[in-house]
Image: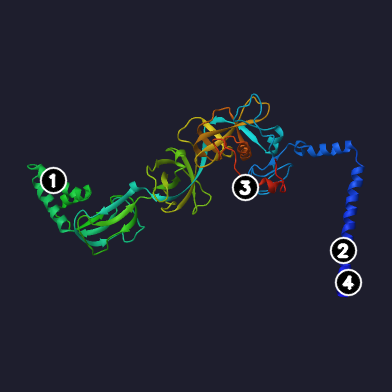
Amino acid sequence: MKNLINNILKNWILIIVVMMTGLFLGWILFHSAGKSPAQFAEIEGHEDHDHESDDPQLWTCSMHPQIKQNEPGQCLVCAMDLIPLTTMSTVGDDVGPDEIVMTESAVKLASVQTSVVKSDIPEKELYLQGKVHVDERNITEITARFGGRIEELFVNFTGQKVSMGQKLATIFSPDLISAQRELIEAITLKESRPSLYNAALGKLRLWGLSDDQISEIEENGEPKLYFDLLSPATGTVTMRHIAAGDYVKEGDQLFKVIDLSRLWVLFDAYESDIPWISTGDNIEFTVQSIPGRKFSSKVTFIDPFIDATKRVAKVRVEIENPRHILKPEMFASGVIRSGVTAGGDQIIIPKSAVLWTGKRSVVYVKVPDREEPSFLYREIVLGPDAGDSYVVASGLEEGEEVVTNGVFKVDAAAQLIGLPSMMNPEGELVMTGHNHEEMANGGIKDH
């Protein structure tokens, strides 16, 4: 019984399949019979028609030239607006083999802008950081000219101001007493042996005694046991090496005095800034401790050496400081507005016009006298950085026109058609590696 039921089901399935096949074949024969030969020819002609000829315009991405599609849109990689590809060609009788020709619509779509190359005096505004320093020429080290014991100290702390001729300390010196006696004895022989007198007099002067002190010794006729040490300079005591009761030897350091009425301000200038700085340039600077006040001075010295660790050179200005409002080690922020030290008019172009690869600097020059915008790849040599511009050492002439906006898009067009470009200076076709076109066109290849 079970086998009978299975046989009946198999027969019904076979009958249904045969019926469906028959209906499908009948439908085909019916429609084929209704078509005329002209209609068949129309169908065949339609199949042979090239759909690509209806819309020969291709669109691509300036940053990713492997992306191509048949209609405008956005790049699948970077979402930039696509630009027309077929309008970027170098066809034409008067067009050079390396020229990139773009239609006016393509130029507008790519936002390509140009500017005329001009010659001018390059100027740059430099911001420098520095510190206030003492003037090294105003540092005085006071040392012992002769040995002895410090009996009394009149300057006993650092930061104390002293004037030239002011008493610093009182010293007892056996050597000085002997020198005074030599002078007193030489006075009696002044007429007969003047050389002896002059030698004794010169010895005391070399030991730092003033003319008034020597005259006092000659008038009294007796040596002084305690002698005053006088300051040889005016300034501020920044170092004290002795105390009352100390014994000192000839050459020992006693005090260090610095005149702070005139100071240096040393600014750090990087290597790229040095061509823009020369002696005589004016610098305006401020310090945090005196807000609202600007100081102005001129560059007096540029360090001939570069610091090996910081990679900077010191630029020095000098400033008068009679009221001592500026103090050493204060931070200073300076501004210098200067022209390049080479001087004279030079070729200047905006930075946006330059494609820089690290080895080459590239611009695109607009070809004059063309019906449609045409551009040429050109390598140039750059001079100093001039803020928003570059000085061009060679490669451009005044009056030429360079692309200043949309340079990457023009360069991408050159890469797409195998012309010299930033990454392919020899003009090689771009190799995409694997076929991105299938992804851009939904899996349909362009043949």
Mark 1 and mark 2 lie on one chain; the one further toward the N terminus is 2
The answer to the question of whether label 1 and label 3 lie on touching residues, with beta carbons closer than 8 A, is no
Report the mark closest to the observer, 1 or 4.
Answer: 4
State the separation of the CA atoms marked 1 and 3. 100 Å
Mark 1 and mark 4 lie on one chain; the one further toward the N terminus is 4
Tell me the amino acid under the disc marked 3.
His
Q: Nearer the viewer, residue 357 or 430?
A: 430
Q: Secondary structure at mark 2?
A: helix
User: Residue beneath label 1, please?
Assistant: 199
State the separation of the CA atoms marked 3 and 2. 50 Å
The answer to the question of whether label 4 and label 3 lie on touching residues, with beta carbons closer than 8 A, is no
Mark 2 and mark 4 lie on one chain; the one further toward the N terminus is 4
Tell me the amino acid under the disc marked 1.
Ala
Q: Secondary structure at mark 3?
A: loop
State the image quarter where residue 104 is shown.
top right
Specify whether residue 230 is in view.
Answer: no
Report the mark closest to the observer, 1 or 2.
Answer: 2
Mark 4 and mark 3 lie on one chain; the one further toward the N terminus is 4
Q: Which mark is residue 5?
A: 4
Report the mark closest to the observer, 4 or 3.
Answer: 4
The answer to the question of whether label 1 and label 2 lie on touching residues, with beta carbons closer than 8 A, is no
Mark 3 and mark 2 lie on one chain; the one further toward the N terminus is 2
Tell me the amino acid under the disc marked 4.
Ile
Mark 1 and mark 3 lie on one chain; the one further toward the N terminus is 1
Left or right: 170 in relation to 218 = right
Tell me the residue at 20%/58% (across/down). 249
User: Residue beneath label 2, please?
Assistant: 13
Crowdedness of circle 4 by 10 Å Cα count: few (<14), some, many (20+)? Answer: few
State the separation of the CA atoms marked 1 and 4. 152 Å
